[in-house]
Image (cartoon, helix red, strand yellow):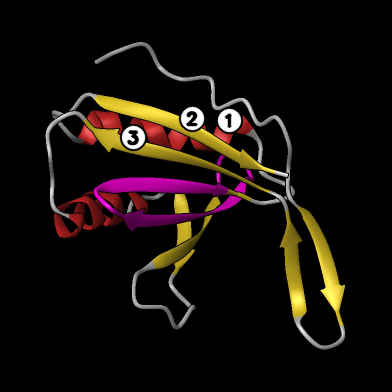
Amino acid sequence: MTEDPSFAIPRHPERRYSRHAGLEYEGTTVFSLSPTAERENGTLDDLLKSVLDGDAYIYGDWFDLPMALYLVHDTGTGDVFRVSVRDGAIEFHVLPGTDPEGLRALYGRLAERSDDDWVVDRQTDV
């Protein structure tokens, strides 16, 4: 396994409440975790759920989307963020109160549970 990424968050999204659109976020930071060996989305989702089913997390998929988008609460760090599996990668979507510690913890558990090395990319939109 390579050196663990820091999961530094350069900018948190800001919540906006609109009377017509409801809750919206302005700005995004997404960490994309790609295994160095190609995997199908289904096996990545199975890996993710096997970690989330542990004692450290409360999570759910309450969104009506064509793919799973989990709202995750790390009970140890108190962090809340969204996680999805898309295009052969697991994505961590930062929310306004997300700290790097919770992202690092989930990454570490995923890395421990798999034999894969992971490439982590960060995308931030203002």
| Residue identified by numbered label 1 | 101
**Amino acid type, label 1:** Glu
Residue at position x 42%, y 78% in the image: 65
| Above/below status of 4 relative to 121 | above
Compare marks 3 and 1 and give the one earlier in the sequence: 1
The residue lying toward the viewer, choosing from 104 and 21, is 21
The local crowd at label 1, few if under 14, some if 14 to 19, many if 20 or more residues have their Cα within 10 Å, is some
Q: Name the residue under label 3.
A: 109
Label 3 vs label 1: CA separation? Answer: 12 Å
- The part of the chain drawn in magenta is 75-93
Q: Would you identify the image quadrant in which residue 64 lies? A: bottom left
Q: Which residue appears farthest toward the top when viewing the image?
A: 3
| Position in image of residue 12 (x %, y %) | 73, 42
| Lateral position of residue 17 relative to residue 100, left or right | right
Location of residue 98 in the rendering, given as x and y in whole percent from the top left corner: 66, 43
Residue where numbered disc 2 is placed: 104
Could you say where residue 27 lies in the image, as x and y percent from the top left?
71, 50
Q: Can residue 9 be seen in this view?
A: yes
Magenta stretch secondary structure, dominant = strand
Q: Which residue corresponds to the image point at 30% horizontal and 45% vertical from the top-left?
A: 89
Element under disc 2: helix
CA separation, marks 2 and 1? 5 Å
Q: Does the magenta stretch include residue 81?
A: yes
- Amino acid at pointer 3: Arg
For the C terminus, give its image quadrant.
Answer: top right
- Residue 97: x and y in percent read 73, 47
The three-letter amino acid code for the residue at tag 2 is Arg
